[in-house]
Image: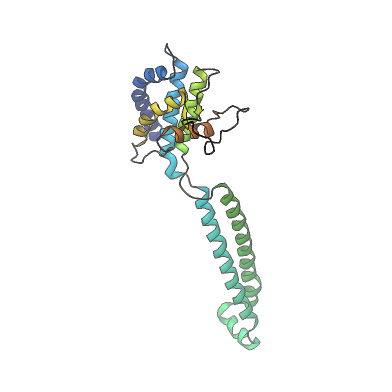
Amino acid sequence: MAEREAFTSLDARLREIIAPHLPKYEKIIGLTAPDDQFRSRVTKAIIACVFQHMLMPYLPRASGLSKDLAKASNQAQSAQNSLRRLADILDGLPQELSDQLTTHWGILGEIRYRSLEREISWLERVSVITSMYAKRLKTLDRGGAPKMRAFEVLAKGLADAYRGARVGRRGITLNEHDEKYTGELLKLVEAVRPLAEVLAEMPKRQLRGPRQGKYALGAYLRTHTDGRRKDERRPNVKNSKRRP
C-alpha cells in the first residue's frame, strides 16, 4: 500500500513538472493548437523513462548472470572431480581398514555407493546445465557499457507521440553534405532531453544517452525508433564526399 501511494505521489509530481513544458514541445514540431493526445504521450514517455531509470540498478544484466553461471559450472566441475578422487581413494583401501572405518562412518557401502555417487551425479548435471545457460546468456549480452534502456524508452515514446501528431511526415532526415541529421523529431528529443535528465537525476544517477551532437543523436533515433522508411537505404556517411 505504501509503495502504491509513493508511486502515485511521484507520478503526480512528475506530471505537474512536465505540464508547463508541453506547449513548447507542440510548437517545436509545428503544431498550432493544443493536442491532448500528443501531450499525453509525451508525458507518458518522460515518466516511463524516469521509472525505467530508477529500476535499472535492480535489473540484472545477462552478461553478469552469464559470468555467475560460468563460475557455478566451474565450481561444480571442481567439486565433482574432488568427490570422484575421494571415491577412488575409498575404493583402494584395504578391506581390513574399510571394516575398521565402518565403526566410525556407519556402513561404508552407504557412503561410497549411494551418497558419493548421488552427489557426483548431481554435480555433473549442475556443471553441464549452468554452462549451457551461461553460453546462451552470453550471446544476449556480451558486456561492455550498460545499455541506454531508459533513454530508449524516452526516444520511442517521443517518436510515437510525434507520429501521432504529424502523420505522414518524416521526423528525421540526413544532410549528407553536412553529415548532420535534422528534423522535427530530432528537435523534439533535443528539447525534451534536458527535462528528462533533470527528473531522472532524482535518484542521484545520471541518465545515459547518446553523445551530444546532431549526428550521434540523429543516428540513434533512426536506429531505435524506426525513423527510416523500409524502402530507404542507409546512407554511407563515411564515404560521402563533401562538396568543394
In percent of width and height, residue 88 lies at: 63, 78
Q: Residue at x 59, y 66 (%)?
A: 77
Q: Residue furthest front?
A: 244
Which of the two residues, 13 or 172, is positioned nearer the viewer here? 172
In percent of width and height, residue 5 lies at: 38, 31
Q: Residue at x 49, y 33 (%)?
A: 242
In percent of width and height, residue 165 lies at: 49, 17
Q: Residue at x 44, y 20 (%)?
A: 40
In percent of width and height, residue 179 lies at: 47, 32
Which of the two residues, 197 or 4, is positioned nearer the viewer here? 197
Does residue 11 appear left or right of residue 149 in this picture?
Answer: left
Q: Please state, as top left, top right, bottom left or bottom right, where the N terminus lies in the image.
A: top left
- How many marks the image carries: the answer is 0
Which of the two residues, 67 or 209, is positioned nearer the viewer here? 209
In the displayed structure, 221 sits above or below 138; it is above
* Snapshot quadrant of residue 79: bottom right
